[in-house]
Image (spheres, rainbow, N blue to C red):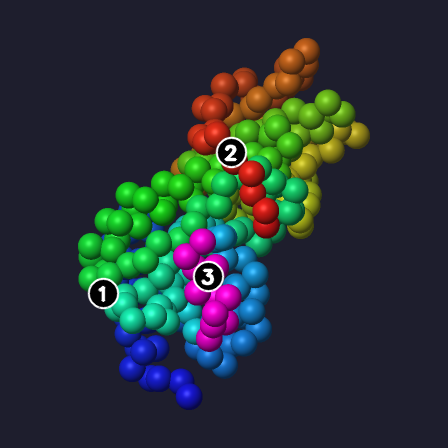
Amino acid sequence: MHDHDTSERLASYADVLAGELPDTWTSSYLPPDAKDDLAELSERIWDLDLVADSLAERPLRQAAVLSRTDGAQLVLLERHDDRHGFLVAAVAPRALPDEAYRAVPEPNGIALADDPFLSAEQVAGDLLLRYDSALAQVRHNALGGIQPSQPDRLVLTWQQDGSIATAPVDDKAGTVLEANGFIQDPQSGIYRLGADDTRRQARALRAIGPQLDALGIGTALQHPAGRTAPTSAPAPATPAPAGARTPTTRTR
């Protein structure tokens, strides 16, 4: 039988924790009757240690999901031992292919005490650092050499076939790209602008700059070795290298 007090405690703790983490996070509670959502969430919990052991003993029956504006997610769940507090783990992005996770270390979850304020410091100083590093590496793997974008900076990369590819981190930039002829791959999330009509391609590049700038998003154009941009395209800017850590063997 579901314990109402436990669900209230879990949801309240998640709300406070989300408000104390750096950047902007929101929380949502998944009750026991959300079986499909809980099952899908269980498949994406990015852990092979403490949280995985807990789920092996007892499947996920309720959870709170913390979501950051760039799509990163954490899951908060009950402990089922004699200790008080909760467990928190990273959630793997839904859209990225399995191949992108190879050789990327698991950002394994941690145990939290009953105090959400102290726990926020623990999450920010430990789990989030490892999670963001793993996310950067996985997204880079999925992009196949395309530099990842940031919330305030869209990186466009010329491809060898003459097309242009980019991976925005939010829907605002994606909407602008689609309005100017970019097509999104639903699996990788990458947007591409074909090279079949170079004038149309150049017009699109000229158009998206001001539109993204109005949203507070800058642009950078990256060229592979041996290629130069059409004179009508925006001037290139060198993107900052993506943060990444030395990978270890990972089995997903």
Which circle's residue, 1 or 2, is located before the other in the chain?
A: 1
In whole angstroms, how far apart are the C-alphas of marks 3 and 1?
Answer: 21 Å
Q: Amino acid at mark 1?
A: Asp
Q: Name the residue located 48 percent from the left edge and 45 percent from the top edge.
A: 106
The image position of residue 196, as x and y in percent, is 79, 30
Residue 233 in the figure: left or right of residue 56: right
In whole angstroms, how far apart are the C-alphas of marks 2 and 3?
Answer: 23 Å
SS assignment at label 3: helix
Quadrant position of the N terminus in the picture: bottom left
SS assignment at label 2: loop
In depth, the one of 124 and 237 nearer the eye is 124
Asked whether the beta carbons under mark 1 and mark 2 sit within 8 Å of each other, the answer is no
57 magenta-colored:
yes
Q: Name the residue located 44 percent from the left edge and 46 percent from the top edge.
A: 107
The residue beneath circle 3 is: 53
Dot in front, 2 or 3? 3
The residue beneath circle 1 is: 114
Dot in front, 3 or 1? 3
The secondary structure making up most of the magenta span is helix
Q: Amino acid at mark 3?
A: Asp
Q: Which residues are magenta?
A: 49-61
The residue beneath circle 2 is: 247
Q: Is residue 207 above or below residue 174?
A: above
The image position of residue 58, as x and y in percent, is 47, 72
| Residue with the most extreme bottom position | 1
In depth, the one of 210 and 178 nearer the eye is 178
